[in-house]
Image (cartoon, rainbow, N blue to C red):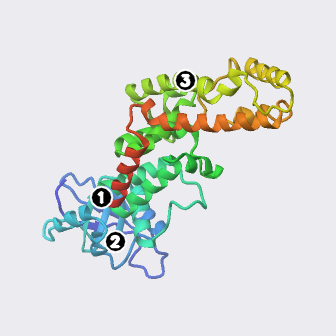
Amino acid sequence: MSQSKLTRKRTGEDDESAPSPVKKVKVLDEDDAPPAYSTALATAKGLWYEDGTVILNCAGEAFRVHQGFLSTHSVVLKARFANLHPSESLKLEHVPVLNIEEAARDMAELLSILYFRRNTFDNTHAVTLRSLSSLLHVASVYEVAPVRKDIIQHMIKLYPLSYTEFVAMPPGLRPRRDEAILAVDVARRFNLHYILPIALYYCCELPTTTLLKGYTAKGVAVNLSPEDLELCLIARDDLRIFQCTIVDRFAGGMQPSKHCEGGACRCRSSLVDVVRAQRCHHSSAIFTALPKSAIYGTGIVCEPCRTEWREMERKGVKQVWESLPGLFGLPSWGELQRNMNIDLASGS
């Protein structure tokens, strides 16, 4: 397409009494088959400024914004603006037009955050991982470090590195299980390896059919890589073994507390019943399932036995937590924490 000038499409804009229409512009090429440019999204988002010095064209959606303002936030856009030579650039209303490859709605979201300082990552409303992924992509492409950092910090809240933070996470903030596959994809694509242990752990809780078919929502389809799929299937079996041999070892050993008040025989018999009931139900959901001592302890075993059982469960869960990164071939929690701190400190 030749870089000839853009012309306004006549829609009654010369009539002052007519309602303000949605602007439609077109570029004349050699075949006289001009594509249309719409400002509908920009108008709805408040991103069409009459004093704007550049128009960003995202596949037909146009945003009239300010070169100077955006240059202070993105070195990539600053460099691209510098290459807009006045004599060669496409123009609309005497304003240069810069073609943007990213999706219009993703760009609108980024521009809205920059212009209106809107916080997309507070806990007052749900933010889907799919929308975070799209925004992280555009913030990374244009190297908008503060926005990228905010997204990463929110991702860490969803997939924490600390067991204490994991347990304390409000139920409304917990990510949807069916987004675990997408979380792994985001971590791999953007080198956020420190969220992988919990993202992969959540994958282990998914049905095998879901692991094989992948994540699909609103036109987005993501699958685990063959390597990650293998990691999850093997780790899921390991977690079930850990549930039996580490977390449930008090019930498995069937040894009442030395301070048993209910009679050793009664408590031992109760523990035997628990083991029989759970023999075929060991789960990989070690960190999200309710402890067995909470389910079976009250009214079944005496308080000293239940207290000792609960403490052994707690220690067992923390022991499995410490080994979680290694199950997926990842560095230790400490090294992942250091990598995360470096990433956040650099603002990359």
Q: Position of residue 86 (x, y in %)?
A: 15, 71
Q: Is residue 71 left or right of residue 164?
A: left
Dot 1: element = loop
Q: Is residue 128 left or right of residue 101?
A: right
> Separation of disc 3 and disc 1 at Cα?
37 Å
Q: Position of residue 300 (x, y in %)?
A: 84, 30
Name the mark on residue 297: none
Locate the C terminus and report the quarter of the image it occupies. bottom left
- Seen at 48% across and 81% down, the residue is 17
Q: Which residue is mark 2?
A: 65
Quarter of image, res 150: bottom left
Name the mark on residue 209: 3
Q: In the figure, 291 relative to 266: above or below?
A: below
Q: Nearer the viewer, residue 274 or 55?
A: 274
Q: Which residue is mark 1?
A: 142
- Seen at 47% across and 51% down, the residue is 155
Q: Is residue 233 left or right of residue 341?
A: right
> Mark 3 or mark 2, which has the lower sequence index?
2
